[in-house]
Image (cartoon, helix red, strand yellow):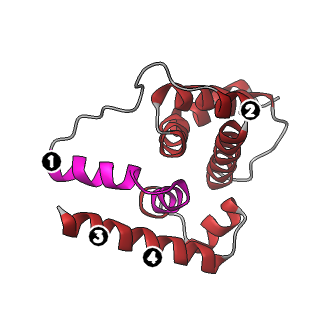
Amino acid sequence: MLEHDIFLALAEKYKDTVFRIALSYLGNTYDADDIVQDVFMKLFITNKHFASDDHARYWLIRVTINTCKNLLKSSWKTKNIALDDNTVTTVFEQKEQEDLYQAVMGLPEKYRTVLYLYYYEDFSVKEIAGMLKIKVSAVTTRLSRARDQLKEVWKNE
């Protein structure tokens, strides 16, 4: 198990990052909260030694992505429908920020993920490719297509 102090420091530092990634994958706060709990439970019980803070961050993001993918393909998730609308209602200071958020959330998951990791988490294309276990060219293609789709949304408004 991870040392208590190290676990608490990592949890405090990266809880928002894990939540935002889960939210971008799943689209609702309830599932994102569940993912955060799962990911930090995995962190708590891991025997992994992290060489650096970046190594821990990378590990947490990779585990978050895998946990989200597992939830999305689970039979429970695919056979159940939501009883209420539990999607995110975020308050933005400017209308443009809200419009951009809605446009990004309207993109397919594979585009949302690379956009988030590239622009918000400042990962390089090579690092994203490693995390998602895809080729570097696939990451650049997804980024390009995501930007093109966002341009189309902005042009039509």
Mark 3, other Cα within 10 Å: few <14 / some 14–19 / many ≥20: few
Q: What element carries label 2?
A: helix
State how far apart marks 1 and 4 are (Cα): 25 Å
Is residue 62 placed above or below 73 in the rendered structure?
Answer: below
Q: Main secondary structure of the magenta part?
A: helix
Give, as a single range, the part of the protein colored magenta. Answer: 94-117
Label 1 amino acid?
A: Lys
Q: Which of 77 and 58 is in front in this view?
A: 77
Q: Quadrant of residue 39?
A: top right
Is residue 80 placed above or below 101 in the rendered structure?
Answer: above
Residue 68 visible somewhere in the drawing:
yes
Q: Which of marks 2 and 4 is in front?
A: 2
Q: Name the residue under label 3.
A: 152
Q: Name the N-terminal-most of marks 2 and 1.
A: 2
Is residue 93 a member of the stretch shown in magenta?
Answer: no
From this viewpoint, which residue is outermost toward the left?
A: 94
State how far apart marks 3 and 2 are (Cα): 35 Å
Label 3 amino acid?
A: Glu
